Amino acid sequence: MKVLKNNAIYIQKNDLAYLVTTVQNVPDSIISKAVKCGEMIIDNKHRYEFIKFTKKSDIAYLNQQNWLLDYNSIKDLTEKEMITMGENIAKERNRLAKKFNSLPAEKRMQSLYMELECSQLEYKMNSLRDFILYQQGRISMELPKEEKDSKLKVLVKSLFQ
């Protein structure tokens, strides 16, 4: 998940791990900030932690990654609206996968970007699921410090639905 706030973008560690292992041409400044001591280990304890990026080019690059779930676009949605959003992402992923699978083998090799898009859509669905679980209190996640007030708003909103 990405959170754009106060001339910075915050990205969860698990998203950075996915980014550096699946996307080509990731800027070195992002990789170096994401990777400590030559390796990046993500476990269940740290996967939802955020890393802050303030370099304008990093913010622009990360904000263009449409497969990253955008906190600012979902924070005020109801659970039902998020489920509908997830269903729409799944439909798009399935449409793309069906199109890719119907291609002849030689065309598939030329269209590997479609396979990556399917993977990114699936990743976005899983991120949305995790955010719903966070809202339900079933997983723990600490939003960037500037966003802590929003966590209370989400709790209050869910109580009065």
Image (cartoon, rainbow, N blue to C red):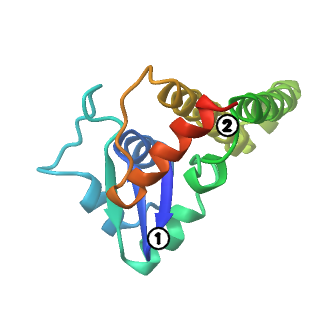
Residue 77 image offset from top left, x and y in percent: 69, 42
Is 44 above or below relative to 52? above
Side (left or right) of 17 relative to 61: left
Which quarter of the image is occupied by the C terminus? top right
Question: Crowding at label 1, few (<14), some or many (≥20) Cα neighbours within 10 Å?
Answer: some
Q: For the point 40% across and 58% down, which residue is it?
A: 10
Label 2 residue SS: helix
Is 136 above or below relative to 112? above
Side (left or right) of 20 relative to 118: left
Residue that mark 2 sits on: 121
Residue 4 image offset from top left, x and y in percent: 50, 64
Front one among 61 and 132:
132
Q: Residue furthest front?
A: 160
Is 74 above or below relative to 42? below
Is 160 above or below relative to 113? above
Q: Residue furthest bottom?
A: 56
Nearer the camera: disc 1 or disc 2: 1
State the image quarter where residue 27 is shown. Answer: bottom left
Residue 23 image offset from top left, x and y in percent: 51, 50
Q: For the point 52% across and 68% down, which residue is it?
A: 61
Residue that mark 1 sits on: 59
State the image quarter where residue 86 is shown. Answer: top right
